[in-house]
Image (cartoon, rainbow, N blue to C red):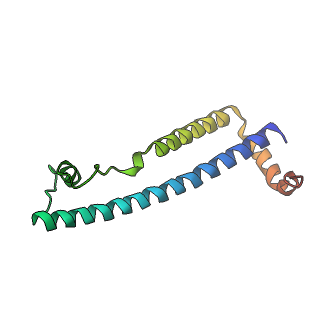
Amino acid sequence: MGFLTKLLLYLFISTTTLVFSYELVQYARDSMRISNMNTFYRVILYYQGMESLTPPSGKKHNPSKFLFENGYLENEFRDPAFTSSTVIMDEYAFILIKFYEKVTKYVDPEAIAGITSKFSENFDSIFSGT
């Protein structure tokens, strides 16, 4: 296979993997948020039962911090969108985008169009030996 064909194949596989990984991380984050909401709901109900009050909330009050400081929670809830795996994936996506920009900057668009049309015509023959 030629260099550009390998490059296009690499970009396709990398992009597909990245999109799939983002979907997986999004599902995991949403599951964590639902779990946190259920725990938070139960802790608020427990606090209401013990104190006959509702924890303060609003612009100046954070109920998660309040419940943590009073010993009802082991730790404050934080948004799982800012975990280390998400940050690493964002960096990988940024690197992939920059790589794509550099490749498209230095490669003739007409040559790419010719290669992609040839690639689509010969798609079956490329993978017939694998």
Q: Position of residue 74 (x, y in %)?
A: 28, 51
* Residue 53 visible in this rendered orientation of the protein: no
In the displayed structure, does residue 106 sit left or right of residue 47?
right
In the displayed structure, does residue 65 sit left or right of residue 85?
left
**Depth order, front residue of 53/116:** 53
Q: Residue at x 68, y 48 (%)?
A: 13
Q: Is residue 92 above or below residue 16?
A: above
User: How many numbered marks, from 0 up?
Assistant: 0
Which corner quadrant of the image does residue 95 belong to?
top right
Q: Is residue 121 above or below residue 98?
A: below
Q: Position of residue 101 (x, y in %)?
A: 61, 36
For the N terminus, give its image quadrant.
Answer: top right
In the displayed structure, does residue 113 sit left or right of residue 83?
right
Q: Position of residue 20 (x, y in %)?
A: 59, 55
**Depth order, front residue of 44/62:** 44
Q: Position of residue 5 (x, y in %)?
A: 79, 43
Q: Residue at x 48, y 59 (%)?
A: 27
